[in-house]
Amino acid sequence: MIDIPDELIATQYAYNGAAGRAFVAALPGLAGRFLEEWGLRRDGAAMYGMCALVLPVVREADGVPAALKLQLVDEETVGEPVALRAWGAAGAGAVGVLGHDPGTGALLLERLDEGRPLSGVAGGGGVPGGSRLVGEVADARRAVTVLGEVLAQLAAVPAPEGLRTLGDAVERMLAAAPEAVGRLADEEERRLLADCAAAVREVAGEPGDRLLHWDLHYDNILAGRADAGRAGEWVALDPKPLAGDPGFELFPALDNLFDAGEVVWRFDALTEALGMERDRGRARAWTLARVLQNAVWAVGDGERELAPDHAEIARRLLGVR
């Protein structure tokens, strides 16, 4: 029997409606099917995120630890196996694909150390093969540095054909920007979001062609396992891939584990890791595009103010006080 976490059920019902309810109802059957078809046995408690159920498993034929990931396929997740295989072929730092069922989107993935996310470094947890750093800021900066190294590997890979594109996303967000600005209750926030949109318009004509993760925050990077030959490595997982400019990747690392005083330091460290230190204006514009994108979504859900952390990121990058 597969127990479906209440939080996953609530998320699917709230955000995906009938499709989410159908997905939740199908999960026990899907899990049973792929445990049998792929010769897997359970090897731990179920894990979950916003949109997926993950079962730790062992492949019975060879004893290889793995993770069975079941998720609702949509425009954000449909490209996941394509992206992971492209990164794998390039030797970039992403989780390996051991199996994929195109009909359901089920994935059999390399098992990582779920107990050692990069967010643990930011909280003083040390690094694989390294020593514990002293002081919360030093720990957080080490985590940012590691994330930048992983990000540079991923963004070096050209995007395969057929993925969703940043060009399409930016066209939609700019079309929705005037209405989003007008619906904000606070005049200062209206000016701030209008400035974000103006910055995005300057770079919209060159959206880029790199393979982007889109959601590379500190809990989406885990330590590799020694039994997979990845001891001492940090490995990215759970991409929502698209083709675009690497500057569009920086926002999650600024927003996750948010620290207003560290926004500019993090931004500079990440642009340096990506080799964009001489083109920080472009990276800044694409980071502000994430503020705009999130605001458009929030306003569409009835919000009338910017998320405080997002607004502060925009202020810091625009030099507004």
Image (spheres, rainbow, N blue to C red):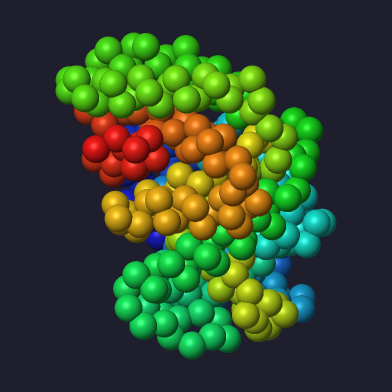
Viewer-side residue, 189 vs 90: 189
Give the residue at the far left of this rendering: 186
Viewer-side residue, 3 vs 197: 197
Residue 56 percent coordinates (x, y): 55, 69
Viewer-side residue, 40 vs 66: 66
Q: Is residue 301 visible?
A: no
Up the image or down, 62 lies above or below 221; here it is below
Image quadrant containing the C terminus: top left
**Residue occupying image coordinates x 46% and y 44%:** 251
Residue 239 percent coordinates (x, y): 58, 48
Dividing the picture into quadrants, the one containing residue 234 is: bottom right
**Residue occupying image coordinates x 74% and y 39%:** 159
Q: Is residue 287 visible?
A: yes
**Residue occupying image coordinates x 64% and y 28%:** 207
Up the image or down, 133 lies above or below 8; here it is below
**Residue occupying image coordinates x 72% and y 80%:** 229
Residue 267 percent coordinates (x, y): 47, 50
Residue 116 percent coordinates (x, y): 48, 75
In the shown orientation, is residue 103 left or right of residue 118? right
In the shown orientation, is residue 161 left or right of residue 70? right
Dividing the picture into quadrants, the one containing residue 208 is: top right
Up the image or down, 41 lies above or below 216; here it is below
